Amino acid sequence: MAKGEKLLERMRRTRFGWGQDDFRRLYRAYGFEIIEGARHIVVRHPEHPDLNTTVARHDELDPAYARTAVRLIEELLRRRGMISEGGPEA
């Protein structure tokens, strides 16, 4: 998960300039399933199906996708007891 951790940290620092392949790598690194669609990919975690979202299939995506990815992964890490309720710095 080291690659995923580095990518997550970079995404925490900047929400701009990310493409669909970045999101695929990030979500897969944390165990999310990727379901390919025509216009979007559907992302969901098999152990926590409520942790899910969609990602458009574009080269550069709106910063909202990065905010969602960080939020979902941080929630997954909280559930696993890897970070506290206050967030990664708490």
Image: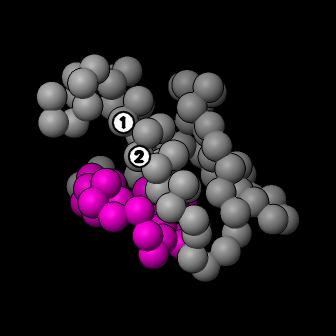
Residue pointed to by mark 1: 74
* Residue 27 seen in render: no
Identify which residue is drawn at 41% across, 62% down.
15
Identify which residue is drawn at 54% across, 72% down.
19
Quarter holding residue 6: bottom left
Q: CA distance from mark 2 to mark 1?
A: 6 Å
Residue lying at the far bottom of the rendered structure? 59
Q: Is residue 37 left or right of residue 8?
A: right
**Element class at badge 2:** helix
Colour scheme in use: one colour
Task: Assess disc 2: are there few (<14), some (14-19) or many (≥20) residues with their C-alpha within 10 Å of its C-alpha.
Answer: some
* Between 36 and 12, the one nearer to me in the picture: 12
Q: Amino acid at mark 1?
A: Glu
Magenta segment range? 4-27
Q: Per the image, is 9 magenta?
A: yes
Q: Is residue 31 left or right of residue 14?
A: right
How many numbered discs, if any?
Answer: 2
Q: Amino acid at mark 2?
A: Val
Residue pointed to by mark 2: 70
Say if 6 sits above or below 17 in the image: above
**Element class at badge 1:** helix
* Residue 32 seen in render: yes
Q: Are marks 2 and 1 in contact (CB under 8 Å)?
A: yes
Q: Main secondary structure of the magenta part?
A: helix
Quarter holding residue 7: bottom left
Horizontal and vertical percent for residue 57? 70, 69
Q: Per the image, is 63 magenta?
A: no
Horizontal and vertical percent for residue 64? 54, 55
Say if 57 sits above or below 74 in the image: below
